[in-house]
Image: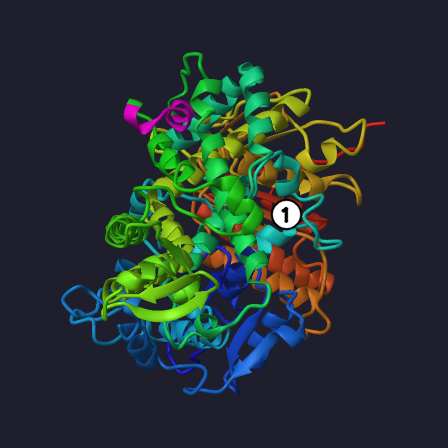
Amino acid sequence: IDQTKEDGVHVGAAFIDTSLGVFHLGQFCDDRHHSRLRTLLAHHPPAQLLTERNKLVTSVRQVLAQCGVPPSLHEALTTSTEFWTAEKTLQFLAQQECMKSETGGVDWPDELKSLLTDDCSSPVENTSDLSLSALGALLWYLQRCYLHDQLLSQRLFQIYVPPDLRDQISSLEPAAQQRVFFKQRHMVIDGSSLTNLEVLRNNNTGDVAGSLCSLLDYTATPMGKRLLQQWVSAPLMCNKAISARQEAVLELRKLSSAVEETVSLFSKLPDIQRLLPRIHSQGLRLSPDDPNSRAVLFEEQQYSKKRVLSFLAATQAFAAITKIPALFHAEVESVLLRSLVTLTTDGGKLPSMEDTLLFFERAFDHELAKKEGKIIPSSGVDVQYDKAMEEIKRTENELEEYLKEENAFFGSKVVYFGSDRRRYQLEVSEAASKKATSEYELVSQRKGFKRFHTARSKELLAQMTAAEEAREVALKDIARRIFQQFDDKQDLWSAAVDCVATLDVLMSLTKYSLSIADAATPEICDAESSEEAFLEIRDGLHPCILSSQEGIIPNDVVLGRGAGEGAHCPLVLVTGPNMGGKSTLMRQTALLTIMAQIGSLVPCSSMRLTPVDRIFTRVGASDRMLAGESTFLLELRETAAILQHATPHALVLIDELGRGTATHDGTAVAWAVAGALVERRCRTLFSTHYHGLVHHFAHTPGVSMGHMLRKS
């Protein structure tokens, strides 16, 4: 955190899910309410926090205290020694083997290179110094846990940019806003809106149950579940991309047999996305400084079995994925769906994995490996092992030839005797042993027989011992090398996982659409050809209460001149009694919009809209007493974000603004905010109990009135 900048508080953040191995780092300027930090914590809920000691102001500590991390998992690190500077972080990274190029220099990943100066010697000032420092704290902690090598070796980095900064539209002139809008890829939903709308979690218990995400979640795989959360948190803006998803869902509704078979197949898959980093770490060659390289495991066989079982689970899962094209044997019309179920060799996105999987299937005896936890490679799989086995075979042949020579020399039967390093003693009958010359060294004897060593037998023994030791060395490291060979195909496996996750989410949206009685396909209209942004919902129902309550009354919402027949205003002042459904209508409108822009069918008779670039909510009356935040302060903070960032393409929901203060003051605040939104001409539902507000805006252009009545 840097509060010395004139333009506001600068925040640097780095985070990682160690089971996936992707480092995220970003730096941004935040407002006094820490809106972007709150959004980051809402989109990526932390399990553990690392902060710089004595550098957090009270307001930031209060924000972090609300993110659900217990104090025992919030660790304050000492500046420089634990919470590294950006320069120290870069020095540490430059020393890592995985960052070194073939010429001996530093091969920075593209994402990290974008944060450095042209000569890659230092961070870009005011752009990446704080984020690299945060990354340093993360690396210090991972190094203490001996996880840094296996995570850094994947070289997976992503730059985090706050959703509202990805296109920087709100601060531009109207003409420039319009140009940027058409390039924007995702809708922005900030932390307050995610919470107010219960998109990812419900507000009562904090669980997923009861949220929009849980409502749509019919996924069969963990990868699909995670991708669905990403889709819901960042809906699409591109008409073509949304339409592609809609077409896929509509076609999947007709392919019920293929969907059921695919769901059955997917339900048996492990979490491949987390298995891949695990196999990667098991395929790494540990440095001598790593304690795991020196550890003596008393249950080595059990650990080996677990590693083998994880590896086989991954190969079997990918083998199952290869069956997907056969399940969709009929001609698929949807372009998106066809790309997910068609092999790359036939023009699709699903990689062809049969040959690669066949190699690993034949690489070793799977049943023996499961039983003993030991991998014995087949011929042609491992060069080091094959070379050792060839040497053993050659030595055995030489031993046989030498034994034949000795039989001929003594004129009687000669056999090898002994074990381990006393092997290959020439056992000769006592009568025949009289032919032994000085080259034969007497080693041992028994009644009627004498045993000799010769220079040649000693040479063959040493040769065999060396070959056997080479075989054991190869076997000791064979599992790691096979895992490494598997990891070398990471691009292949990742592409397959992406196809599975996307198909899983599309099938989830399909199953949801089949679970509701009336499901309409939203019509996403081109904002460029529309006179004004609009939203039209006919007979809409709140998706989250539809399944839990009966007798729900559908409602229409029409905002903007492009919606339906006649002139409709972008801002609607909604009045009505308490518990009349005003707040429910607002949340319903936002949730249906989110569903429409992720490509889902929605519970209504029809829906038309131009894409929404951002959803703002000022809904509900609550305070945060422990954080020192009153209801009125929360209202003003959320309203300030609306006025600062709302564009003509936004959807704004304001529910009884001003309830946290006196009636006169509340009316003044609501009056000013409503007037500003009328000028902004963004789609707005503004509920109020202030009659003076209604009278003032009754004849204002761009404002229409709506009243919620309870139907008996």
Magenta span of residues? 336-345
Q: How is the image coloured?
A: rainbow
In x, y percent, where is residue 692?
A: 68, 50
Question: Which type of secondary structure does the marked residue at label 1 adopt?
Answer: loop
To which quarter of the image does residue 450 belong?
bottom left
* Left or right relative to 149: residue 580: right
Q: Is residue 55 above or below residue 20?
A: below
Question: How busy is the neighbourhood of tag 1: few (under 14 within 10 Å), some, or many (20 plus)?
Answer: many
Q: Answer whether residue 658 is visible to the viewer in this image.
A: yes
Q: Amino acid at mark 1?
A: Leu
Q: Name the residue tied to disc 1.
A: 197
Whether 101 is among the magenta residues is: no
Q: Is residue 214 above or below residue 375?
A: above
Q: Position of residue 395 (x, y in %)?
A: 27, 53
Secondary structure mostly seen in magenta is: helix
Residue 277 x/y as whole percent: 45, 54
Q: Is residue 468 left or right of residue 94?
A: right
Q: Residue at x 39, y 46 (%)?
A: 377
- The furthest residue to the left: 103
Residue at 32% in and 77% down: 92
In this rendered view, identify the residue nearer to me: 706 or 395. 395
In the picture, measured across the screen, residue 327 lies left or right of residue 707, that is: left
